[in-house]
Amino acid sequence: MADDTSKKSTPPGWYAGGLEHIWLPYAQMKTATPPLPVVRTHGSRIVLADGRELIDGIASWWTACHGYNHPHIRQAIERQLAAMPHVMFGGLAHEQPLTLAKRLAAMLPGDLNRVFFSDSGSVAVEVAMKMAMQYWINRRAKGRSQFVAFKGGYHGDTTGAMAVSDSEDGMHTLFAGLLPQHLIVDLPDDAAREATLDRLLAKRSDDIAGIIVEPLVQGAGGMKFHDATVLKRLRALADKHDVLLIFDEIFTGFGRTGTMFACEAAQVTPDIITLSKALTGGTLGLAATAANRKVFDAFWSDDPKKALMHGPSYMANALACAAANASLDLFEREPRLQQVATISAALALGLEPCRALRGVRDVRVMGAIGVVEMERIDNFDALRARFVEESVFIRPFGNVIYLTPAFTIAAEELKVLTAAVVKIVRDF
């Protein structure tokens, strides 16, 4: 599936004219390689304007779990569009978000049964942090505004989310020292680090509103894995020192790590959980912050000042919630977790040859996540271009080359992806 350069042509008119006015994500606009013009998607394929097709290895930043253009999701959106694309959620309610909230409450572990909808994962984290701080205010325990977060963690690009991400080794190093200061520590992945965190919580519990962690996988911080024992330790420490526990499952939720939610692997339930990305099957922006009864009850009052004062304009958007309900239908009707297990085995087999290659630090797989960690990557543009030449779309970052394909990807397509990684790492 090598690149057919004969198909390359002049980009469409909308491309050149619009590119002069767009600001791209995570890109130095002066030097970045121009983005690829896309005209269509289907299954696990991205179709470029010049006719080339790329197998998508990362499911559009981990969102398109059912593949692109799934007819069930598309039809649900079309039906909702004809009836009502959007109406404000203040003083009004409608079917799709109420149905979705009920379904999420039934799926989530424990009593995570109050759901607040927002537009994106970063905002879901902001809402979770706001809930946690106000929980203590409403309980007359003012001053608990600090969060414990972890080295290697990433929770989003808004100000509050950046503040609980790793500012030393993450993508927000320019803002180190400028954001609200929280407690960024090592994950308690051994007894010594658990004891260190225990001492910190004992000393600072009067200042701390909560602990926030990405369960099992720290995604954008480097695709770093930890085991379920870490989550059990965090739950025990949160209970011991009376602080809230927040799981950021924006990446890991909806099957990516092998269970519907990563916290299920540890049989640990947080006080608050954040969800997004695969929630709508990669079709529309939507996020959810779900809290347990303990948290919600702190807001349940005759005092209007104890209400959660937050409300995005497009909160509970009808089209996005219709897509999410259709996505949940697919998880119920089709064997998604079985597909994840099959992908996991194929990733482990297909990426294993990288382990013996020069410059490779580690090869690891969890669920439908396959990672080749390099000693370093010096030229991202050249590396990404090489993948396109192999007719695949893979976007390395930091020092990792990773695959997070759609759960519906064909076995032969997955083989093309892993073969491309092995080939290019061998030539790296």
Image: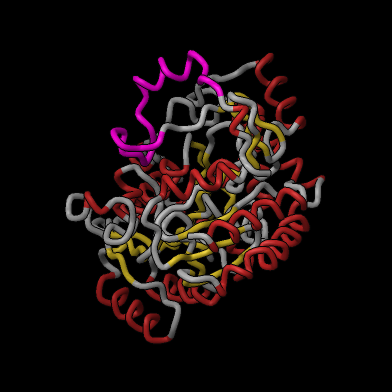
Q: How many labels, in total?
A: 0
Q: Nearer the viewer, residue 155 or 289?
A: 155
Tell me the residue at 43%/47% (across/down): 382
The percent position of residue 326, horizontal first and vertical second, equals 72, 35
Q: Is residue 333 left or right of residue 18?
A: right
Point out the image quarter for the N terminus.
top right
Tell me the residue at 78%/47% (across/down): 332
The percent position of residue 211, horizontal first and vertical second, equals 39, 63
Residue 409 on the magenta segment: no
Whether residue 296 can be seen here: no
Whether residue 263 can be seen here: yes
Quadrant in the picture for residue 313? top left
Q: Nearer the viewer, residue 95 or 420?
A: 420
Tell me the residue at 29%/75% (across/down): 200
Quadrant in the picture for residue 344? bottom right
Q: Is residue 98 left or right of residue 218?
A: right
Note whether 216 is above or below 401 in the view shown. Answer: below
The percent position of residue 395, horizontal first and vertical second, equals 50, 47
Note whether 369 is above or below 349 in the view shown. Answer: above
Residue 18 on the magenta segment: yes
Q: Is residue 18 left or right of residue 249?
A: left
Note whether 349 is above or below 321 in the view shown. Answer: below
Note whether 96 is above or below 256 in the view shown. Answer: above
Q: Nearer the viewer, residue 350 or 146?
A: 350
Tell me the residue at 64%/46% (across/down): 104
Q: Nearer the viewer, residue 267 or 152?
A: 152
- Span highlighted in magenta in the image: 9-33
Q: Main secondary structure of the magenta part?
A: loop
> Which color scheme does this rendered protein use?
secondary structure
The percent position of residue 301, horizontal first and vertical second, equals 42, 44
